[in-house]
């Protein structure tokens, strides 16, 4: 087998399988930092080689600045893998402050979402990130998720963003597979899938890994999938992708990824409290059953 066939994947600087980690909470709704450290250690032991905290799955819209900073510290103290921290908002000044404080707390990289809701112009998007980059001293991962932001980012804007200092990678949750090769060619940025269901297709298009919801309970087989792909065993990677498909649907199918990630962790016996902050409600009986069915169908639990 040729060298090309045996090493298909580029280096993944922030990890290859990176759970978008939930934020454990006590029953009163306060952040349980001890449980966060424990969860981080469990995720790494199960196969994660990077972690994202303060993302959407971590309920970042409902946690406060001090909590975000303390969460970075708690997770950094618990594990020895790259820790990315979400540091994005639709308010540029607030985003800059989050970037400054989370990198000071020890984040290895910053995930900065495209500014949402206000739907700025393409020039406004570039100006937003330029302001963040002036204050950042850690690598920045652009997060493009138009289903949540309501914003389409053009290839030309990607090109301009890639020229900014510290911008190194993209978490792509656009679902637009056809655009990936063009964007990668035009920017030279490192690519991560932001969609569990498109993990293997993204690897085939040059992504180095995934920032994932289902990695909370499936990081082992997800690493195996990447290894098989890297070794040129496409059929083996396809088998794993097919096996994981019921779990993808169970955790992502209704757009309640944060809720379903906590449901899966509860079913797996990893998380005691599934408390969430409003407007999200913690998983109920139906969601716990849904998570359990998905895990069993994926071969992660005995039927």
Image: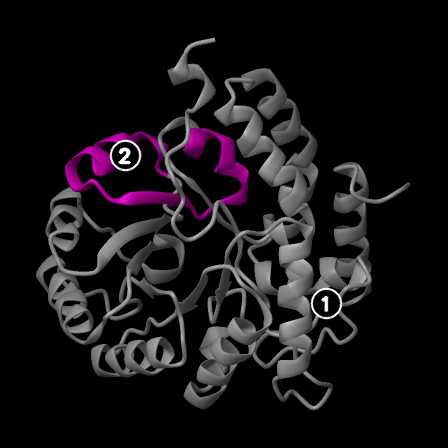
Residue 185 drawn at (x, y percent): 19, 33
Gap between marks 2 and 1 measured at Cα: 35 Å
Give 214 or 165, whichever is nearer the viewer: 165
Q: Helix or strand or loop: what does disc 1 sit on?
A: loop
Q: Is residue 156 left or right of residue 197?
A: left
Quadrant assignment, res 248: top right
299 vs 124: above or below: above
Residue 250 drawn at (x, y percent): 68, 47
At a point 22% along the width and 32% down the height, the residue shown is 182
The residue beneath circle 2 is 179
For the record, the magenta segment spans 176-203
Say few, some or many: other residues with alpha carbon within 10 Å of mark 2 (under 14 / 14 to 19 / 20 or more). Answer: few
Disc 2 and disc 1 in contact, CB within 8 angstroms: no
Q: Earlier in the sequence, mark 2 or mark 1?
A: 2
Residue 203 drawn at (x, y percent): 43, 32
Say few, some or many: other residues with alpha carbon within 10 Å of mark 1 (under 14 / 14 to 19 / 20 or more). Answer: many
The residue beneath circle 1 is 283
Is the C terminus in the top left, top right, bottom left or bottom right quadrant?
Answer: top right
Asked if the stretch drawn in magenta spans residue 191, the answer is yes
User: Looking at the image, can residue 260 be seen?
Assistant: no
Asked if the stretch drawn in magenta spans residue 41, the answer is no
């Amino acid at each position: 087998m040729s060298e090309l066939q045996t090493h298909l994947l580029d280096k993944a600087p922030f990890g290859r399988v990176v759970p978008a980690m939930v934020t454990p909470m006590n029953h009163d709704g306060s952040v349980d930092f001890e449980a966060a450290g424990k969860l981080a250690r469990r995720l790494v032991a199960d196969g994660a080689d990077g972690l994202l905290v303060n993302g959407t799955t971590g309920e970042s819209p409902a946690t406060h600045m001090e909590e975000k900073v303390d969460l970075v510290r708690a997770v950094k103290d618990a594990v020895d893998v790259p820790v990315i921290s979400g540091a994005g908002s639709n308010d540029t000044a607030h985003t800059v402050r989050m970037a400054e404080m989370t990198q000071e707390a020890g984040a290895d990289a910053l995930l900065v979402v495209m500014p949402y809701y206000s739907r700025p112009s393409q020039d406004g998007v570039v100006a937003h990130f330029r302001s963040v980059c002036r204050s950042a001293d850690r690598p920045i991962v652009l997060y493009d998720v138009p289903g949540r932001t309501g914003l389409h980012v053009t290839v030309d804007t990607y090109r301009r963003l890639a020229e900014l200092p510290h911008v190194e990678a993209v978490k792509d949750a656009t679902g637009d597979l056809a655009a990936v090769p063009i964007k990668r060619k035009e920017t030279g940025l490192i690519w991560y899938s932001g969609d569990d269901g498109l993990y293997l297709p993204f690897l085939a298009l040059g992504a180095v890994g995934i920032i994932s919801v289902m990695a909370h309970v499936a990081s082992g087989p997800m690493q195996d999938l990447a290894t098989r792909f890297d070794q040129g065993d496409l059929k083996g990677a396809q088998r794993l992708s097919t096996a994981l498909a019921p779990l993808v649907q169970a955790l992502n199918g209704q757009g309640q990824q944060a809720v379903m990630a906590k449901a899966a962790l509860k079913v797996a016996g990893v998380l005691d409290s599934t408390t969430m902050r409003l407007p999200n409600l913690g998983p109920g009986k139906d969601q716990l059953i849904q998570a359990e069915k998905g895990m069993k169908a994926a071969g992660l639990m005995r039927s």
